[in-house]
Structure formats: structure tokens, C-alpha cells
Image (spheres, grey):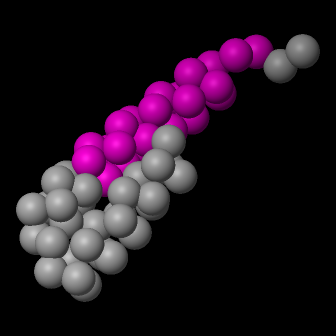
Amino acid sequence: MLRWAILFLVIALIAAFFGFSGIATTATEIAKILFFIFIVLFVLALIFGKSRPPK
């Protein structure tokens, strides 16, 4: 998921460089959403991964 967020960020930067502000804005918003979803899932994995007893 982090890979997708980085991909959309790169697309947004390239679109902004060439002057496509609508595409750049949309790609930036998608990258932000994917990044925050990644952070939430990462934190949940840290919390629930530690709660398992060792084998």
C-alpha cells in the first residue's frame, strides 16, 4: 500500500510539473488517503502483533 501511495505522489509531482493541476490535485489526495490507511494498518499490526504469546 505504501508503494501505491508513493506511485500516486510521483504521478502528482509529474502532473504538477507539466501544469495539469486537476490531475495533480486528484493524485495528491489519493496518495494522502493511501498513506494514512497504510499508517493505520501499520500501527494496528504493531499493536496486535505484540499481543500474541511467543511460541
Residue 17 position within the rendered picture, expressed as x and y whole percent measured from the top left: 25, 84
Q: Residue furthest right?
A: 55
Of residues 28 and 15, the one nearer the viewer is 15
In the image, 1 versus 17, the foreground residue is: 17
11 versus 30 height, above or below: below
Which residue is painted at 10% across and 70% down in the image?
Answer: 21
User: Would you say 25 lies left or right of 47 here?
Assistant: left
- Up/down of 36 relative to 40, above or below: below
Q: Residue sitting at 56 percent across and 30 percent down? A: 45
Residue 52 at x, y = what percent?
Answer: 70, 16
Q: Quadrant of residue 14?
A: bottom left
Above or below, comparing residue 46 to residue 54 in the picture: below
Q: Is residue 55 above or below residue 30?
A: above
Tell me if residue 44 is in the magenta stretch. yes
Give the tally of numbered discs: 0
Is residue 32 at least partly visible in the picture? no
Q: Position of residue 7 (x, y in %)?
A: 45, 59
Q: Is residue 6 magenta?
A: no
The quarter of the displayed image where residue 24 is located: bottom left
Of residue 8 and residue 34, the one placed in the foreground of this image is: 8
Residue 31 drawn at (x, y percent): 31, 53
Tell me the residue at 45%/60% (across/down).
6
User: Can residue 22 be seen by looking at this rendering?
Assistant: yes
Horizontal relation, residue 45 to residue 6: left or right: right
Q: Which SS type dominates the magenta stretch?
A: helix
Residues rendered magenta in the picture: 30-53
Q: Quadrant of the C terminus?
A: top right
